[in-house]
Amino acid sequence: MIEKLKYILYFFVLLLVQTLILDQICVSVYVNAFVYILFIMMLPIETNKYMVLLLGLLMGLSVDLFDSTLGLHASGGVLVAFVRSFALDIFSPHDGYEANKQLSVRNYGYYWFFKYAITLILVHHLWIFFFENLSFANMLFTLAKVVISSVTSFVVILLFHLLLMSRK
Amino acid sequence: MRNLLDFVVKYAYFILFIVLEVLCLVLLFSANPYQRYGFATSANVVTGTIAEKWAGVVQYVALAEENEALKKENADLHNRLEAYRRSSIPVLGKKGFDYIAASVISATTNREKNAITVNAGKNLGVENEMGVIGRDGVVGIVSSVSDKYAVIMPIIHPDARISVKLAENGYFGSLSWDGRDVRVATFSEVPGYVDVRIGDEIVTSGFSAIFPEGIPVGYVKSFEKDLSTDFYTIDVELYTDFHNIKYVYIVRNNNLEELKASDGKEQKKK
């Protein structure tokens, strides 16, 4: 129960950090940080995968409501939730994951976190920036945005992960 | 039937994923930006209230700076009013325009599809497709409204089109944005025989009835002539600094009802 409350808290903290702080900061069109997907990434390993899809949808829709981008982040959230189960399989540690052990740097190390997080971030950013722009004519511009924003997002995601979730 | 059931059970996860994605993308592409209901955008009560409260906290820090800017704008308006009194320009339209002041409570400006949320809605007479201007020039057009809040589609949104002209000689065209630079928009449809110079001012044309005529938009930063079509593509440096936008004025055209009514009549005659 406490565990569940903790994740509900993460949901709101990440949603508000995303929409009230990160989305209001303007550096350049190339630099966008998306921290909200951290919530989907870090859901407990034993979470039902259908539930993960629905939570991805819920998180994305909530961001959309704040940003007036109905459907965009909802679709991105669902995609990250879908890819998550495959990424977890691919990057599974030697002895597998343990139930009740949080998916975190503290439990599985920085290298694992980097591989897992950067995969989901790249998939998400490619999707979001492609659907925002919806043309192949600007592919180079879109790719540049994906790369630069992915690096930014990774840094912010690692920061909030360490701050919120990777503690005793 | 049995096979179908087996199939559904086997691929349920994948099917749910596809169904949700299709739903999301239908939402994304079906929404006409000017017909969005307030509750489906940042104008809804929940996000609007949260953003407004938060903006109150953040803006408190910048109050002194904002006051200074407002004082300057006030002085400028006094000067213009004085000049207007002395001149004898006839008032355009019988009823003219009203300006509704609003504070920005949330603004995304480094996305492709940017949005600005302000704390004025139907309660103050804001309606869809009204023009929005700021201290320095045109900001955008209202794209959805709820009771207390409105969302503005800024010039820096790929669907925004604003009718503008060269202040010097009145040649007009439309202003659009390609998503690259928050300070620069594209002015197209100006014929190649027009004399365009760097630094020429671009203002609203007044043709669309959304904006009064002559509101500053920006100035010519660079231009290029397309030899095959003989039209200019002009890069316009925008006056409005979208990274630093605190308050706006929503423009209400009081002649709009009459204009629409007379339009209807003319179309009936045809």
Image: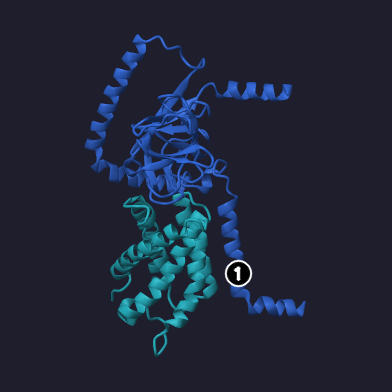
- Residue at (39, 67) in percent of width and height: A38
- Is A44 rendered above or below residue A11? below
Q: Which x, y percent locates residue B243?
A: 33, 44
Residue located farthest toward the front when viewing the structure as drawn:
B227
Q: Quadrant of the C terminus of chain A?
A: bottom left
- For mark 1, give the secondary structure: helix
> What subunit carries mark 1?
B
Q: Is residue A67 visible?
A: yes
Mark 1 = which residue? Answer: B16
For the residue marked with disc 1, what is the amino acid? Leu
Which colour scheme appears in the figure? by chain
Q: Which chain is cyan?
A: A
Task: Check disc 1: other Cα within 10 Å, few if <14, some if 14-19, many if 20+.
Answer: some
Q: Tell which chain the image draws in blue.
A: B
Q: State which quarter of the image contains the N terminus of chain A.
A: bottom left
Rendering coords of residue B112 (x, y %):
44, 51
Q: Is residue A42 visible?
A: no
Q: Horizontally, is A153 left or right of B10 in the view?
A: left
Hey, which residue is sitting farthest bottom in the picture? A95
Q: What residue is rendered at 32% in x and 19% in y?
A: B80
Q: Report which quarter residue A118 is drawn in.
A: bottom left
Q: Is residue B54 left or right of residue A40?
A: left
- Residue B238, by quadrant, is top left
At x 64%, y 24%, the residue is: B263
Task: Give percent across and percent down for residue A40.
Answer: 44, 68
Q: Position of residue A133 (x, y in %)?
A: 49, 54
Above or below, B7 relative to B72? below
Against A115, residue B20 (above or below) is: above
Which of the pair B124/A63 is nearer the observer? A63
Q: Nearer the viewer, residue B49 or B154?
A: B154
